[in-house]
Image (cartoon, rainbow, N blue to C red):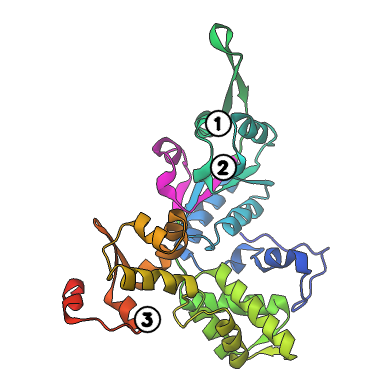
Amino acid sequence: MSTPPNKNKKEKVGERPEPGRLDAALRPRRWKEYVGQEQVKKALSVLIEAAQKRKEPVEHLLLYGPAGLGKTTLAHLVAKEMNAQIKVTSGPVIERVGDLAALLTNLSEGDILFIDEAHRINKLAEEMLYSAMESGALDIIIGKGPSARTIQLDLPSFTLIAATTRISLLSSPLRSRFSGGVFRLEFYDESDIRNIVERSSNILGILTEKDAVREIALRSRRTPRIANQLLKRCRDVADVVGSKEITRAIAMEALELLDIDEKGLNGEDRRLLKSLIIKHRGGPVGLNTLAASISEDVGTIEEVYEPYLIRLGFIERTPKGRVATIHAFKHLGIDVSNDKQSRFF
């Protein structure tokens, strides 16, 4: 089902992309280039192939999961597989009903509308989506009071692909209208991250030792976006020292400069854990109190720090608040007293 590459476009293996288009160049351009998320890919492949046979647009899709796992990339690949135009926007941009109406009325037959951070769509605009997704019509109210009247505009057949990092903030009526399916993207396996780093190295036009690839993958928090960011910083160090190859020594120097340890934790992650362990004796502590103790936003802790720390088993969410586990104590090299140990086992 892969779309053949454009033969008119000259593309050389190992040729460095233009600096301003670097992040876009590292994104997979074809279905077979997308590494990982095998279960989601299989399900989407069936949806796409069935829609192509019926000559219909793909049904509406919702993608959710932590940031950097490839939700935007998947949306673009679905559009490419369907040979459809994709219009991209984000939830915070849709502040008024008129903003959404303008987007929907400018769609053409078979277009894909991709809304990132969909949980931040204005609630009134969200309600307008219900009829647009379900019946392909747009209900617009003209006027106010007794003289107000409703006009219904028919919309072309389109596909809405929404992405969110916080699915719990989406209303139940909106979630139920994603008839194509709701798909969760999981953290990647280390082997998949290594494949992604090797592919990105080829695109950047720099050789990378296997040991360096392994170190980058280990510290990437199992997230492709972070893996590519670390690779680019390693390339910076290689360029500065005049090396044509990213060796393990160069990778370790770059990762040390970024203050990223062997588990992928940065200084902010460790600061959160130390605050939980030292200031609050390992917990339990409420999220608002924890956020205040490190001068951080509650949403940032929930969306950025916690998913990976919970996956590592360093933090637990309990009814009474957040608790640091024995693994967090050991990772930071903090002794656990006998009375502390009894709280974790």
Q: Is residue 180 left or right of residue 196?
A: left
- In depth, the one of 268 and 68 nearer the eye is 268
- In depth, the one of 68 and 334 nearer the eye is 334
Circle 2 SS class: strand
Q: Amino acid at mark 1?
A: Ala
The residue that mark 1 highlights is: 132
Q: Amino acid at mark 2?
A: Leu
Percent from the top left, x then y, of residue 311? 37, 69
Would you say the residues marked 1 and 3 are in contact, meaning their CB atoms lie under 8 Å apart? no
Q: Is residue 140 left or right of residue 182?
A: right
Find the magenta span and give its range.
159-183
What number is the disc on residue 160? 2
Marks 1 and 3, how far apart at CA: 52 Å
Whether residue 128 is visible, yes or no, is: yes
What number is the disc on residue 4? none
Would you say the residues marked 1 and 2 are in contact, meaning their CB atoms lie under 8 Å apart? yes
Percent from the top left, x then y, of residue 279? 33, 69
The residue that mark 3 highlights is: 332
- In depth, the one of 335 and 105 nearer the eye is 335
